[in-house]
């Protein structure tokens, strides 16, 4: 379980690309981060079932902390950066690490010349929807995707100053 010193170190460390050696911890962290939703869903949250190996190979998974306590999966799609997953160790949730990862996504998208961020979340994960709305994301659609009720959101990126 990460303590305050690990969270502070994650902020001080640079967010780095995940390596295949990180795969077990990436999976463990994702399962732990989404465990709190298991009781309200009729199935395991999709991110907890995801094999992140291909995304790590494609250089889409970014991690922070030693040990890893946060991750974000970023995939360029057309003129947008898709945030496919944000996961923070339960002991580090509420510390600002999620904000750090979302800010990184914005910087990464701008550096790639992209004009917006896109993401999706399960409609039962209402806390996530509220967090994303506070960060400027707006709902664009709701639909069933692979058996999950999903809320799609996006955020336009103003040009860098």
Image (cartoon, grey):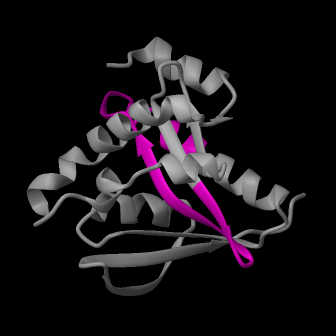
Magenta segment includes 14: no
Query: Vertical placement of 110 versus 30: above or below?
Result: below
Check the picture and name the quadrant holding the C terminus. Answer: bottom right
Left or right, 43 with reference to 143: left
Work out which residue is located at the far right of the displayed protein and give it.
161
Q: Residue at x 58, y 44 (%)?
A: 101
Magenta segment includes 88: yes
- Can I make out residue 113 in this image? yes
Left or right, 159 with reference to 37: right
- Can I make out residue 96 in this image? no
Query: Vertical placement of 133 versus 101: above or below?
Result: below
Q: Position of residue 1 (x, y in %)?
A: 31, 19
Q: Which residues are magenta?
A: 74-101
Work out which residue is located at the far top of the displayed protein and give it.
5
Q: Residue at x 57, y 66 (%)?
A: 136
Q: Residue at x 55, y 60 (%)?
A: 135
Q: Residue at x 64, y 53 (%)?
A: 58
Image quadrant where residue 25 sits: top left
Front one among 149 and 17: 17
Q: Position of residue 4 (x, y in %)?
A: 43, 16
Image quadrant where residue 62 sits: top right
Query: Vertical placement of 92 versus 155: above or below?
Result: above
Q: Position of residue 32 (x, y in %)?
A: 27, 38
Query: Vertical placement of 48 versus 69: above or below?
Result: below
Q: Position of residue 99 (x, y in %)?
A: 54, 45
């Amino acid at each position: 379980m990460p303590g305050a010193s690990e969270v502070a170190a994650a902020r001080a460390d640079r967010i780095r690309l995940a390596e295949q050696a990180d795969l077990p911890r990436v999976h463990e962290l994702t399962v732990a981060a989404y465990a709190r939703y298991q009781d309200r869903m009729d199935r395991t949250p999709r991110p907890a079932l995801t094999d992140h190996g291909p995304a790590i190979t494609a250089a889409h998974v970014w991690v922070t902390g030693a040990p890893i306590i946060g991750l974000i999966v970023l995939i360029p799609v057309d003129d947008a950066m898709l945030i496919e997953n944000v996961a923070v160790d339960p002991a580090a949730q509420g510390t600002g690490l999620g904000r750090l990862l979302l800010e990184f996504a914005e910087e990464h998208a701008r550096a790639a010349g992209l004009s917006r961020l896109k993401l999706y979340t399960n409609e039962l994960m209402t806390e996530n929807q509220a967090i994303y709305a506070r960060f400027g994301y707006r709902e664009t659609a709701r639909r069933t995707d692979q058996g999950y009720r999903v809320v799609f959101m996006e955020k336009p990126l103003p040009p860098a100053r």
